[in-house]
Image: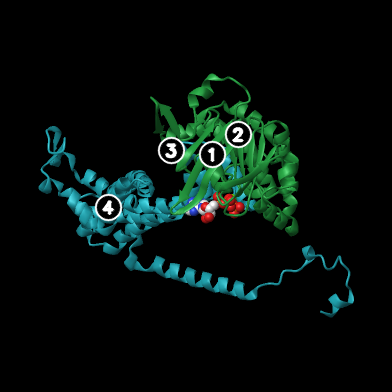
Chain colours: A cyan, B green
Amino acid sequence: MTERTISPSMDLRDVANAHQPIEWGRWLLWAFVLVVAANFAWIVAWNPNFGWPIVAEWFTAESILKGLSVTLGLTVVAMIIGTAIGLMLAIARMSNDTLFSSLAGLFIWFFRGTPLLVQLIFWYNLSTLFPQISIAVPFGPTLVSWNTNDLITPMTAAIAGLSLNEAAYMAEIIRGGLLSVDKGQVEATDAFGMTRGRALRRIIIPQAMRSIIPPTGNQLISMIKATSLVSVIAMADLLYSVQAVYNRTFEVIPMLMVAVIWYLVITSILNVGQGFIERYYARGERGATDVRANVRMEEPA
Amino acid sequence: MTIAAEKISPVPAEPLVRARNVHKSFGSNEVLKGIDLDVMPGEVVVILGPSGSGKSTFLRCINHLEAIDRGSIVVADEQIGYELRNGRLHKLSDRAIAVQRRKIGMVFQQFNLYPHMTALENIIEAPVGVHKQNRREAQAYAMELLSRIGLTEKAHAYPRQLSGGQQQRVAIARALAIKPKLMLFDEPTSALDPELVGEVLATMRDLADQGLTMIVVTHEIGFAREAADRVVFMDGGVVVEQGRPEVVLSNPSHPRTRLFLSRFIQRG
Ligand SMILES: Nc1ncnc2c1ncn2[C@@H]1O[C@H](COP(=O)(O)OP(=O)(O)OP(=O)(O)O)[C@@H](O)[C@H]1O
Ligand SMILES: [Mg+2]
């Protein structure tokens, strides 16, 4: 204190030369947390009940990898179809046309309001409700007709159930994103004579993405886990595959650990991907880091 | 209104904009109560008037951002929003209205630049995407426009990295890039800090000197005095008075114009 008041030289007062105080409290807390975490990892690693050798043995077993690919494939397909239908639903719901907006509202109401498990079972058993599926003139002649049992396999039932359910949730997420875009942007696209589709594609959706992506990341991760429900309609996903093994070997915990680790691996990869996508759509925001990030993103394009 | 007669006479001194008896209500609130206004090619018309008098609404009717309830608006021989077919007036489709708007540029109070695009991308978006121009040519023209407004080095900056005045000048360049027949300005300097107003007005004055047809809603009396060919004073949804700026601004004949201007001069 005294030194500073005695020498009021402006060089000394340059904040660039200031000493950072050492934050002992924070360092201590870090050390404590790391020690506890290391200790917990040690305990888990040496606990024989987890059966790590069995985990290692099964982790890349063929049946497990097959189940994993079913889980991933279902997730990707259901998410893509769900997002596409969700986008159409969101646009329909926001349109001035009462017919479109109420139809979209009805869809969303139904598919969000009933349990996914029930929806899956319904799709799977569609043939008992409608043995024939036909395209026909209402109250008129039939044009084409299929046997429902030929159409509905466990795979198609799973895809239909998961993606229609996902569409209902994505519709609301996308609608929220579209609503978050400034009204002046729509007005500018109108004033320039852009068509609706082009305005959505070039101006509105890219701006809506910033608020669409975080909840979509949530949806994707819940979808990966929701696919485990398809085991009720005899689809062998990741969880179903480990269950098939422990039903024979009774090594319940090690086999569940196999599934858990795989789920965590996928989720981590998705988190990294989400970070990249978020930074891409944050371009144009004020701030040096964002600018640098977007320069990097744009170079390969 | 005789559209047929217009088509026959090739006299150059024909109005570019012809608004007749324009009425517009929002619910029970009648905002425009019969506006008549002609704007000649190359003319700069400044619309003045108190807040809520319907200036923005009228401007937005000209490019059909708002649909009018009664009357007609014709821009470059095309009735905005409607089409005369077999002696009857038909409402145009959204797509046809979009096509009509493409010859009218608009500059907004809040700029409304696309925040996820650089200045250059903002400017070429409509030429390339809507007018189907060659990207390279559109870029060259965009750079020319940017150099005219003195912002060449900001071509790759995003709107949020620009000052308000720079953003508005980019917005003006964006509207010019489509080579509009008519430019609409809705209070282009009202969202700007006072020290940034001058640069935007200077850009607009250049455009006026180059013979662009402009309708400008503004509270900048100085701009009206220097750049306008005609000043239109609106109040309560009607045109109260119009004429040469030196007449309307210095020697207004209508008491409401006098009241409005005196308040302005008092305010500064
Ligand atoms: N979309 C709308 N819905 C309902 N009322 C509206 C709408 N737009 C404008 N109005 C009303 O119309 C009237 C005229 O508005 P307008 O924006 O045209 O005024 P203005 O002359 O531009 O005023 P200012 O100088 O404040 O911009 C106001 O009373 C306003 O509340
Ligand atoms: Mg206004």
Q: Which residue is mark 2?
A: B182
Q: Which kind of residue does numbered mark 1 sit on? A: Ile
Is there any visible trace of residue B190 in the rendered image?
A: no
Q: Which residue is mark 4?
A: A106
Q: Which kind of residue does numbered mark 4 sit on? A: Leu
Q: Nearer the viewer, residue A229 or A141?
A: A141
Indicate which label's residue lies in the foreground, 2 or 4. 2
Across and down, in percent, residue A47 comes to 37, 69
Q: Within 10 angstroms of label 2, few (less than 14), some, or many (20 or more) residues?
A: many
Residue at figure coordinates x 67%, y 37% from the top left: B44
Q: Within 10 angstroms of label 4, few (less than 14), some, or many (20 or more) residues?
A: few
B5 relative to B117, above or below: above
- The quadrant of the picture occupied by the C terminus of chain B is bottom right
Indicate which label's residue lies in the foreground, 1 or 4. 1
Q: Which residue is mark 3?
A: A197
Instruction: Measure how far apart labels 1 and 2 are at the Cα level.
Output: 10 Å
Q: Secondary structure at mark 3?
A: helix
Q: Which residue is mark 1?
A: B62
Q: Which kind of residue does numbered mark 2 sit on? A: Leu
Residue at figure coordinates x 73%, y 39% from the top left: B227
The lab-note entry on whether marks 1 and 4 share a chain reads no
Q: Are marks 1 and 2 in contact (CB under 8 Å)?
A: yes
Q: Earlier in the sequence, mark 1 or mark 2?
A: 1
Q: Nearer the viewer, residue B19 or B149?
A: B19
B177 relative to B252, above or below: above
